[in-house]
Amino acid sequence: MSPILKQTVKNKNISFWKILAMIIISVIVTNIATDIFSRYGASFGSLAALGALLLCSTICGRIIYKNLAYYNYRIIEDELMVERVIGRANHIFFHIKPKDIKYIKPYKELNDHDKEIREYKFVTGNNKNNWYVVEFLKDGRLCRVILEPNEAFLSALNRNLEKIEENKGLSHKDIS
């Protein structure tokens, strides 16, 4: 049985003050929209309030979702698994077998024509220097997962690919 390796990539915790500010701004924007549009009639004020509340809720939800979500990368029995965790709920997005992986390389080495393939990002922050691209075949289509692995996880993933290539009798030149 192969060893199990897991890496968790988390954002910084969102502060209480940031959440409180989002709520207060949502209430203020809703009240301003209601006041402005209620001059044109009660129905316009109600519609504006509902629209402003929906918009503010969506924006706040996106900010909280982005800051609370974290990612787990796992290698279990030579299979790469990527999952998103929010609170107690987790959703596994990909099970990638090493034989399906075309290459692993740093994100900054992608060419412009390479960026046309569908990308799934499982990273936190915007520091692209730490991002790696795993391109693989899924149901006959090329897909790309962008990860932010640490050195231990990256070397374990590369070892798994090298084993597959050795079994095929080929060398894997794209591995970083």
Image: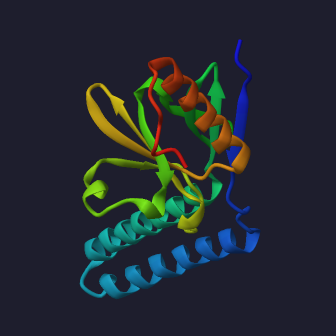
Figure quadrant of residue 71 = top right
Q: How is the image coloured?
A: rainbow
Q: Position of residue 97 (x, y in %)?
A: 49, 24
Q: Is residue 90 above or below residue 65?
A: above
Residue 159, above or below 41: above
Q: Nearer the viewer, residue 1 or 138?
A: 1
Q: Is residue 22 left or right of residue 13?
A: left
What residue is at 60 percent from the left and 23 percent from the top?
78
Residue pictured at 59% horizontal, 37% vertical: 158
Can residue 97 be seen from the camera position used here?
no
Instruction: Name which residue lies at 33% across and 73% down.
Output: 48
In this view, the residue farthest toward the top is 1
Q: Quadrant of residue 13?
A: bottom right
Residue 8 in view here: yes
Nearest the eye: 23 or 34: 23
Q: Position of residue 120 (x, y in %)?
A: 42, 47
Residue 141 is situated, as x and y percent measured from the top left of the image, at 26, 33
Q: Residue at x 69, y 50 (%)?
A: 150
**Observer-nearest of 154 and 143:** 154
Q: Is residue 4 above or below residue 17?
A: above
Task: State left or right for residue 101 relative to residue 5.
Answer: left
- Is 9 in front, or is 155? 155
Count of number-bearing discs: 0
Q: Quadrant of the N terminus?
A: top right
**Residue 30, horizontal then vertical, whole percent:** 45, 76
